[in-house]
Amino acid sequence: MATFLARLIPLFLLLGSAYAAEPQDAPPQAGPAAVIIFIVLFVGSCVGFVVYFFWKDRKPKQGDQEHKE
């Protein structure tokens, strides 16, 4: 059975390549301004996420508790 499958799978791959679609033109590439904007937004959101959790988990100081009461 293993020998049968070992011979059958390459046959399907060979026959399938005959029906493959023609290669298309390359998709349009993003400009450098779009890449820079993406990097700034991505890094900014990552930094904002870290800062949010840093401030959320920060323990209040002694002076902060006196002002709340």
Image: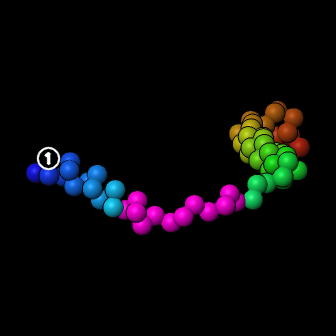
Farthest left residue?
A: 1
Residue 57, can we see it?
yes
- 23 left or right, relative to 43: left
- 27 left or right, relative to 63: left
Residue 52 drawn at (x, y percent): 76, 45
Say whether residue 19 is magenta.
yes
Q: Which amino acid type is marked by label 1?
A: Thr
Q: Nearer the viewer, residue 48 or 15?
A: 15
Which residue shows up at 68% across the image and 57% down it?
Answer: 26
Residue 25 drawn at (x, y percent): 67, 61
Residue 62 drawn at (x, y percent): 82, 32
Q: Nearer the viewer, residue 29 or 53?
A: 29
- 25 left or right, relative to 33: left
The stretch of residues the image draws in magenta is 16-27
Q: Which residue is mark 1?
A: 3
Which residue shows up at 50% across the image and 66% down it?
Answer: 21
Which residue shows up at 33% across the image and 61% down it?
Answer: 15
